[in-house]
Every structure is written in structure tokens, then in C-alpha cells.
Amino acid sequence: MKQKILAVDDEVHMLKLLERIIGEKTAYQIQTTNNALEVPPLLTQQNFDIIITDLKMPGMDGIDLLKHIKEKNIDSEVIIITAFGSMESAIEALARGAFDYITKPFKKEQIIFTVDRAMKFQQLKRENNRFTEILNLEPFGLAEAKFKQEYLNRLKERCGAQSPEMASRSGFSPDEIAAFLKNV
């Protein structure tokens, strides 16, 4: 599944710039809107890994959008961009849970670097949540089976589903590996 970004800015040329940078330099999918009031309904219909939003916009500004995302427990990282950067607005944004705060004009490398960091952070959060769920399973046999499944899925990715190599590297018998591969 392709990781998704929503860019929100009332300036259409900024959205086109973000689309071009992210489209050309990353494998992420980007959707844009120049109306911040469209974002809350969009967030009920789709999941976005990252939301890049301008700070100053009519109707709903970037801080209002950030508050909405945090109040609704939406699992998206928020990157705020602004031409009106100040220490106060940066502190407020970061204190409210923004992933990062970038002032315009910015270099494309800065956006790519920040987006990549936010995506890696999202992956780590999801992985942590998966393992927390496994560790909270009861009885132990259920947690053990789920962990084994997760372990073998990752081993399969590393070994390219090569049964002998998976058995050699994991310590599981070739029959256990074959049964696992048959059920995936």
C-alpha cells in the first residue's frame, strides 16, 4: 500500500510545487486541497500518513487543523509550513503535536527529508502498536502464535520466500516453513 500525503494550502501554486516535489522525488501518493474546510470530511473518508498544511489560511488555519486531528485521534503526522514563521507559532505548533514546522521559502530537499522522517516515524509507530497488541494477547500461546506469524512474515520478505533459506536462518523445520508458506 502506497503511503499517502494530504497537502493543504490556500495558494494553488504551493500545492502544485508540493505535488511536483513529492511526485518526482518520492514514492508517496499526494492529494491536495486549497480549502482547509474540506479536510475534516476528507479525514473521515481516507487515511493519510502525513498532512502538510499551511499555517495561515482562511476558514481554518493550520493550528485549527492540527487541533482537529489531535482531538479526533487521527493517526497522521502534521507538518506545518508557513511564510509567516515566528518563534511563538513554531512553539505552539510543536507543543500541540506537529511533527515539524518549516518556513517558506524552503528547499525541496528540506521537504523530502522531513516527509521521509515523518513516514519512518509512522512506520515505527505502527510497528510498535503491532508488537504491543501481540504482547497484550492472552493466553501466552495466542501471543506466541501471533509473534511466530509476524516473525515468519518478515523472514519471508528477507529471504524472498525461499523455503530452505528460511528454515536454515530461522531454526524452524522445512515442514514448518512449507506449512507457513502454504497458508500465506
Image (tube, grey):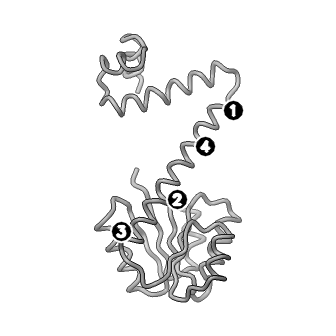
**Separation of marks 3 and 2 at Cα, in angstroms:** 18 Å
Q: Earlier in the sequence, mark 1 or mark 3?
A: 3
Q: Earlier in the sequence, mark 3 or mark 2?
A: 3
**In the displayed structure, would residue 49 be above or below residue 12?**
above
**Which mark, by number, is residue 13?**
none
Q: Is residue 29 left or right of residue 70?
A: left
Judge by depth and name the residue closer to the eye, 24 or 179: 24
**In the displayed structure, would residue 157 be above or below residue 22?**
above
Residue at image coords 50%, 87%: 83
Residue at image coords 47%, 59%: 117
- Number of residues whose C-alpha sits closer than 10 Å to that of mark 4, classed few (under 14), some (14–19) or many (20 or more): few
Query: Label 2 sits on what residue type?
Result: Asn
Q: Which residue is mark 3?
A: 22
**In the displayed structure, would residue 86 be above or below residue 3?**
below
Residue at image coords 52%, 59%: 47
**Separation of marks 2 and 4 at Cα, in angstroms:** 17 Å
Q: Which residue is mark 2?
A: 47
**Location of residue 129 by image quarter:** top right
Query: Label 4 sits on what residue type?
Result: Asn
Q: Is residue 82 left or right of residue 142?
A: left
Report helix, strand or loop for mark 1. Answer: loop
Judge by depth and name the residue closer to the eye, 78 or 103: 103
Report helix, strand or loop for mark 2. Answer: loop
Q: Which residue is mark 1?
A: 136
Q: Which residue is mark 4?
A: 129
Tell whether label 1 touches label 4 (CB within 8 Å): no
**Separation of marks 1 and 2 at Cα, in angstroms:** 25 Å
Instruction: Indicate the quadrant containing the C terminus: top left, top right, bottom left or bottom right.
Output: top left
Image location of residue 39, percent across then percent down: 56, 73
Query: Label 3 sits on what residue type?
Result: Ile
